[in-house]
Amino acid sequence: MTDQPTNCITLNSPPTEEILRLDKEGFHYKGEFIADAGEAHRLMVEFLNQPTPKPEPVAPTDEELDEFAVFWWGSDADERTVTDVIECCSRTAYARAVIARWGQP
């Protein structure tokens, strides 16, 4: 990235790549000055309408599974398997949120 004036608005994607910049000189798109206001508007709307990428589901860690099992069953959690935990807990809001984070049905 280049040095930027303090009085500007920038939109970056990913966080390190400047896409749009509005400053006292005008509108810049990917480092290029855009003099035409209609073209500047079109480029900005196109950028803003891009779908937001969704992060890949992250599998739970062993520690999270252990914590989940203890949360559900208490001290006898050692006798249960992860499958038991998922099957028995899938009806609770907490379990649904955890399972959704994992990308499971």
Image (tube, rainbow, N blue to C red):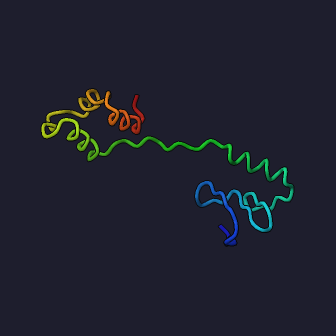
Number of numbered discs visible in the structure rendering: 0
For image coordinates 68% across by 62% down, the residue present is 9
Q: Where is residue 96? Give x, y as percent.
A: 36, 33
Q: Nearer the viewer, residue 89 or 103?
A: 89
Residue 57 lies in quadrant: top left
Q: Where is residue 45? Give x, y as percent.
A: 73, 46
For image coordinates 41% across by 35% down, the residue present is 100
Residue 68 lies in quadrant: top left
Q: Nearer the viewer, residue 2 or 75?
A: 75
Residue 35 lies in quadrant: bottom right
For this orientation, the residue located farthest to the right is: 36
Residue 34 as seen in the image, left or right of residue 83: right
For image coordinates 62% across by 54% down, the residue present is 13
Q: Where is residue 66? Give x, y as percent.
A: 23, 43
28 up-or-down from 42: above or below: below
The N terminus, quarter of image: bottom right
28 up-or-down from 95: above or below: below
The C terminus, quarter of image: top left
Q: Where is residue 37? Give x, y as percent.
A: 84, 54
For image coordinates 14% across by 34% down, the residue present is 79
Q: Nearer the viewer, residue 92 or 100?
A: 92
Residue 86 as seen in the image, left or right of residue 34: left
